[in-house]
Image (cartoon, coloured by chain):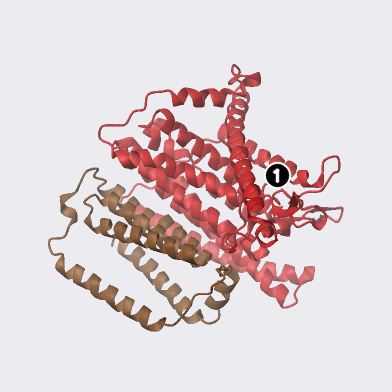
Amino acid sequence: MPAIFSLDPLFLGDAGNLEILAIVLAKVVIAFAGLMVSVMLMVWWERKFISDLQNRIGPNRAGPFGILQTLADGIKLFFKEDLIPDQSDRFVFKLAPYLSLVPAFLVFAVVPIGGDFSNGGDGLISVFGNDTYVQLADPHIGILFVLAMSSIAVYGIMLAGWSSGSKYPLLGSVRASAQMVSYEAALGLALVAVLLKTGSLSTTTIVREQAGEGPEFLGLFPMPDWNVIVLGVVPFIIFFIATTAELNRPPFDLVEAEQEIVGGFHTEYSSIRFALFFLAEFMNVVTMSAVMVTLFFGGPAGPDLGVLPAALWGFVWFFAKLFVFLCLFIGLRGTLPRLRYDQLMDLGWKLLIPLALGWVLFLATLDVFSDRGWTSGGERLVVTGVFLAAMLVFAGLLMVAISNGKKARERDGEEVFG
Amino acid sequence: MVAQNIFFGIMAAIMIWAALRVVTTKNVVHAALWLVIVLAGVAGQFLLLGAEFVGVTQILVYIGAVVVLFLFGIMLTRASMGEDENVNLPNRIVPATVGVLLFGLMAFATIDYWRDAELPKDGSPTTVEAVSDSIFSDFIVPFEATSVLLLAALIGAIVVARKE
């Protein structure tokens, strides 16, 4: 078996082909079903939670607490009439929902969703005597695959808007493509911080590096060795904001801003094709939350508290962390007003990208000086101080450049916001 | 390696067909989409060779950024739905000749240089570490030259886009 797709010991051991096939198939089914069920629950939970925030009841008819509402909606959408606009590009119009759904699925394949990382474990669990990772694939390129898929996901939205052959969807797609291309840069730069520390693109390695105990909190008790703490909180915050923008979630949902452009790219979609877009959107929320848990919060790594077998604690920790992120996304939707388009572009280009770049340089500087033996607290403080001073100068220059640009545009009689 | 050869053939056939469609289709957006298929084929060929990093970078850069910007530009400016009669240049002979000559030159150079080279038979992928080691040691000068070139292009684009 060539190791093109995986570093998983399952393929390197002496397990029979049939056995490997059975285990891989089981993993595919678990990943697929797990993702579908969590998306279903996510949609229900979002509607419930946001109703609570808005003093409403929310769905409460289908099943206990309305938990089957998503299922009922899905069945309803299946049987609705499927409309294709007369002016549309029929083939592309039908293709677009799948272009949006498939990448959302594929990202989940490289996310470790369980495994025993406690007490220096390496994340392997044993299935019928064969050691394997609890993720569909662990390629060398791991996290780059996530970026590649999220960049393909733009196509679904762009082509949906264009192929509808009407104005508002087209505006939605143009907004979407500009927004997603802009924030991908900040996303990638925040990711570089994680890769600098881990030295590997493989998601399993990234999680393994975060297992165990990290620095002490004020010398009182050890904190977990999560990247969010070790790298300083900044890369995580940048990644989180950029992810929210990539997902077109509020407050960055200009792509489908109802008050301005009807439904945006999916205005003309109905029936099951609309359901696929809807599904893809929520699936992306779940998978990107899972990616953030993996990158910054130690994924399935966590202490083994007994009671359950050690192999199951990975699942518990992973889904607990995932749930916190999902609630965070819903909370943002319930509380923040939508950004204006110029604010969106300013935030991405003038704040997030320079900040992410500066922070990566900062981490790299610290790394270089610890290689030279500057490891004590005082020496690190000196490096930090000098670096901060240099960065402040650069930030000042950037601000001057921005305000000069604004003045020049005002002089030319252009309308300038903010 | 037999399976790899078969898939190489299939993908190469699809790529050639898609490449022909890029230049023959009269709808600009469709041309961009056919280009995506060609580029995805290139990424697939890299994966077949075990060059995972290059393959994914191909997807990330060309499909995820370059063609998206093409499409963005098309949508922002014309976005015509149907067939566009003005897409085809009246003079096709010169570009076609240049294309054929360029293909011949590159094919000759490739075959001449790697005539006797053999790919490793075990099919093990090239790791990211190996790629970065060779970029930052053996190929550091071309790498830096490319970076400076890209920076120059970036600054050039800004200068062109400015009003005065």
Q: Is residue A134 above or below residue A393?
A: above
**Looking at the image, which residue is at 55% across and 58% down?**
A144
Q: Position of residue A143 (x, y in %)?
A: 58, 57
Q: Position of residue B94 (x, y in %)?
A: 16, 70
Given residues A107 and A58, the one toward you in this image is: A107
Asked if residue A417 shows in the view, the reply is no
- Return the chain for callout 1: A
**Looking at the image, which residue is at 75% across and 75% down?**
A374
Q: Is residue B87 left or right of residue B7?
A: left
Q: Position of residue A232 (x, y in %)?
A: 68, 57
Q: Is residue A88 above or below residue A66?
A: below
Q: Position of residue A410 (x, y in %)?
A: 35, 52
Q: Is residue B86 left or right of residue A172?
A: left
Residue on which disc 1 sits: A318
Asked if residue A104 shows in the view, the reply is yes
Question: Quadrant of residue A358 in the image?
Answer: bottom right
Classify mark 1: residues with Cα within 10 Å, few (<14), some (14-19) or many (20+).
Answer: many
**Looking at the image, which residue is at 36% across and 38% down?**
A94
Q: Colour of chain B?
A: brown
| Amino acid type for the residue under numbered disc 1 | Phe
Circle 1 SS class: helix
Question: Quadrant of residue A359 in the image?
Answer: bottom right
Question: Quadrant of residue A97 in the image?
Answer: top left
Residue furthest to the top in view is A61
Q: Colour of chain A?
A: red
**Looking at the image, which residue is at 45% across and 58% down?**
B59
